[in-house]
Amino acid sequence: MSLKAQLSPGGDGEHISFCRLCEALCGLSVAVAGGRIVRVGPDRDHPVSQGHICVKGARMVDIVHDPDRVLYPLRCKGHAGEFERVSWDEALGDIAGRLATIIERHGGESVATYIGNPASFGSLHAAYMNGFLRALGSARKFNSLHTDTGAKNLAMELTYGNPYRYTFPDLEDCDFLIVIGGNPVASHMSLISEPRAMDRLDAIAAKGGVVVIDPRRTETARRYDHLPVRPDSDIWLVLMLLRTIFDEELFDTATLDAAATGWRELRSAAAQVSLEAASARCGVDVATAEALARRLAQARTAAVYTRLGTGRGSYSTLTNLLIEALNIVTGRLGQSGGWVIGQGAVSAPTSNPFPYGSKRSRIGNLPLIIDIAPGGTLADEITTPGKGQIRALFVDSGNPVLSYPRGDRLEHALASLDLHVSFDLYINETNRLADYILPATTFLERPDMNEFWGANAPRPWIQYSDAVLAPQGEARTEFAIYAAILERMDLPSPLAMMGTQDCPDPDPMTAIDARLQAGPWGAASLPGGLSIEVLRDRYPHGYRYLQKVDAEATRAAITLPGGKASLWGEVCAAEFERLLASGPATPPDGETLLLFGRRRLQSLNSWMHNSERLTRGHQPTLQIHPADAQRLGIAEGQRVAVTGGDNRIVVPAEVTADVVPGSVCYPHGWGHRGGWQRANAIEGANVNLLASDNPADWEQVSGMCLLDGIPVRIEPA
Ligand SMILES: Nc1nc2c(c(=O)[nH]1)N[C@H]1C(S)=C(S)[C@@H](COP(=O)(O)OP(=O)(O)OC[C@H]3O[C@@H](n4cnc5c(=O)[nH]c(N)nc54)[C@H](O)[C@@H]3O)O[C@H]1N2
Ligand SMILES: Nc1nc2c(c(=O)[nH]1)N[C@H]1C(S)=C(S)[C@@H](COP(=O)(O)OP(=O)(O)OC[C@H]3O[C@@H](n4cnc5c(=O)[nH]c(N)nc54)[C@H](O)[C@@H]3O)O[C@H]1N2
Ligand code: SF4
Ligand SMILES: [Mo]
């Protein structure tokens, strides 16, 4: 019997678990003594992370036992931000009663949810949240997608048919990698699960090279080759690469015909963009782009990977579509060491119940992506009268006041809701305006499986972890809270739709166990196959069900006719037309600078800033190029006013040639005034106050907010 199976939640000793803060999902060994976590360390026996963790995982001890944590249900005392402790019974009773009244008066569609980033790492979290809404007669879902993955989801749907799957680089056998708008040293990569990503990138660099395309000389760019680009201009660089590959015939027609449709139309469209015009836009000279295209096409194996830096600009969808195309045209799709779709131990959906274009948003008339409404419209959804006006909002694991544009307008809207309920660990900038804050467990106080992320891993593994500690205080899992509210309303439980005859009302772990058992490696089809019991007792450190992603199986995940990728369609054609109509580059006026963001290893979006060890001596700065600083009369450390739209923030300047001229860089997730005392004391500003929440200002095919390349003006404060 394994050590793990001997320990029950809260038992003294080393608990084997895994981190659920980012996609790396590193194995953890958590020491518990006297009912408290005393140390969070690496699990050296984890089959993939093999002893890797980062500082954030280790500081989960600060979060679990943070004196500022919300451990009891809180009810607003009447003034925003003032709360009193109430019993679960009182809170649930009042919430259920008020919900029933709101639904009776305004219909189920007046209830909405926003779920944030941490929910992506909880088993079936999105599924049971959907079940909760469905039981109430609503489908009004918001989440972080429109600041994050939306353009990629849409590119996946249009190129391969399935927005729920992701392409990623097969890092194992890759000789040459281009990273556009990602900073793995800080983020550990995204939409791909590889806890030892930096080892993999180092190996690729040694074989053939890693080129990092970024407006900032990031930690990753320093480690490999940096190709600087102007913010929000990648579309032009990607077109230079594609054009070179087409013009110089650096591709194989027969292979391409077998893999994809529409490439001839794409080639004709790309031919309309001159290399010189594109170079003037993105700031990369023609010879450099041509050389990069040749390197990409001629490497034995290669991939072009992209993340946030191309996802929130003026041409997010087209850029993401053309990056898929770059991989496909160069023959990398389904190539070992190339560009792949992976395999999950729990099967992913193969059909798409919400095809692109089938639903549009009430505000802004924007197409929904995988049934998620554009998060940037939330304030207007709440304040705009009429059918479907949102009256009740559940915010679960999210902080949209800091993570979406114009938190000031959102705050105003939140204050007008009939009911605002939050499930969180803290009083944050969003739920300080809530009627109720209900205490949720941290991931160390609940069981989970990494059922979703194995499908995005170059070295796929599956792991189950029991709760390491019992819930602290009166915290409950989000599932238990949703289920308790529905129970009080005499409605079916959130996962009832997933139930079977044996278990009509499953909890998430029962439901996911059934799916694991029914999956390709499951106990239902293989003797000795996988189940939660097998994972818990035989593979507590995680089980690698494949030594390496099956690159060739990528084709089987394409759901378009003939199993071929599509490189041309209505959206692509229309976006190309818009691009070509955008006219020549306007010379910089010297006044307007383009603002973009950055991440820091020790920080996670808008939270973890209450940990002393993660923030000691840190203050976010506005990075500005020396040439711009000199022209604008700004010195190192000086406080500057940054104006964007109707708003302005005041922040200290950091003069550095790491950012390209004409741009400035400041991280998101700051400007604290919640219940986290240390975080509040750090001088930081909410950069998203400068972004636009007017839907007309966003990329219209995806509804993605414009968060990188925000036009701003800077002056000494
Ligand atoms: N300008 C700019 N804006 C951005 C970004 C950017 O790069 N630039 N990045 C965007 C991206 S990629 C994302 S994902 C979003 C993130 O934005 P959101 O998802 O809206 O919010 P987070 O900052 O992740 O805040 C998470 C909240 O969940 C709480 N929490 C943590 N763990 C748990 C848990 O287990 N259960 C519960 N119930 N609560 C928990 C935390 O206390 C915190 O209040 O921000 C986006 N906003
Ligand atoms: N330490 C840490 N790790 C995290 C997170 C965190 O907050 N902290 N957040 C997690 C989340 S929610 C996510 S979604 C992932 C994100 O993972 P990444 O996408 O790797 O995250 P970022 O560090 O924001 O990298 C985006 C890069 O794009 C660059 N960029 C900005 N604008 C442009 C542009 O116009 N063109 C190009 N080419 N580049 C541009 C930025 O300079 C930045 O280096 O990270 C996850 N991991
Ligand atoms: S890289 Fe850090 S935050 Fe991400 S899973 Fe590993 S320990 Fe957790
Ligand atoms: Mo994200």
Image (spheres, grey):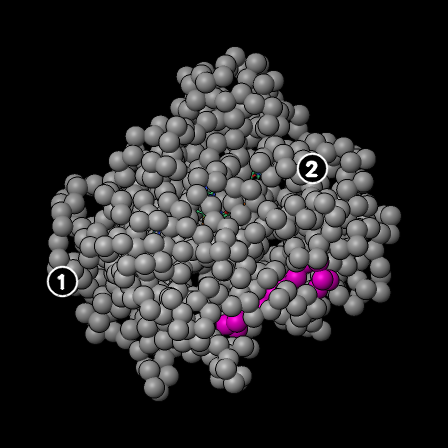
Q: Secondary structure at mark 1?
A: helix
Q: Which residues are magenta?
A: 334-349
Q: Is 398 left, or right, of 254 in this rendering?
A: left
In which image quadrant can residue 334 be found?
bottom right
**Label 2: how many residues lie within 10 Å, few (<14), some (14-19) or many (20+)?**
some
Residue that badge 1 annotates? 89
Beta carbon of the mark 1 residue lies under 8 A of ligand 1: no
The question of residue 135 being in magenta is answered with no
In which image quadrant can residue 341 be found?
bottom right
Q: Is 222 left, or right, of 87 in this rendering?
A: right
Residue that badge 2 annotates? 225
* Quarter of the image where the C terminus is located: top left
- Vertical position of residue 588 compared to residue 121: above or below: above
The question of residue 348 being in magenta is answered with yes
Residue at 58 percent of width and 18 percent of height: 626
**Residue 326, image x, y percentages:** 72, 52
- The amino acid type found where label 1 is placed reads Asp
